[in-house]
Image (cartoon, grey):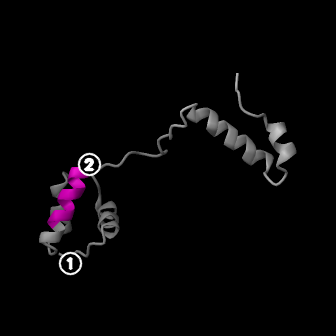
Amino acid sequence: MKAGPKRAQINKHVLEILLSRNKTSLRREAQRGADNISLPRSGAPQKLTEDQRDQTYDTVTTNPHVAMRDLLDFVDNVIQLHPLRCLLREMNKKKWRG
């Protein structure tokens, strides 16, 4: 049985919190458990490993004129062109067209 306060008790004391928000907060607290462990984020895991990201960064830093096709081959075509461009934008790296 839960040891924390119930929804009705909380809503009596704090009127400005919506009931739906209160329900969601209590449900998430129950999911996290007593240790308040963070849950993993929803969504697919990243396709590039940290090593591949580091190698891509080093490659673009040393040779900004490398072709996108070569970068995709370098990471074994795990990702496509658009995610590679997003990755480079995230790294604040300018890559010359080629």
Rendering coords of residue 19 (x, y %): 80, 45
Residue that carries the numbered disc 2 in the rendered image: 49
The quarter of the displayed image where residue 75 is located: bottom left
Rendering coords of residue 12 (x, y %): 87, 43
Taking depth in this image into account, of 5 and 46 the one nearest to the observer is 5
Q: Is residue 30 above or below residue 98?
A: above
The quarter of the displayed image where residue 66 is located: bottom left
Rendering coords of residue 59 (x, y %): 15, 65
Start-end of magenta stretch: 50-59
- For label 1, count other residues whose C-alpha is less than 10 Å away and answer few (under 14), some (14-19) or many (20+): few
Residue that carries the numbered disc 1 in the rendered image: 96
- Which residue is painted at 31% across and 48% down in the image? 47
Judge depth for marks 2 and 1 and give the one in front: 2
The quarter of the displayed image where residue 53 is located: bottom left
| Amino acid type assigned to the residue bearing label 1 in the image | Trp
Taking depth in this image into account, of 25 and 14 the one nearest to the observer is 14
| Amino acid type assigned to the residue bearing label 2 in the image | Thr
The C terminus is located in which quarter? Answer: bottom left
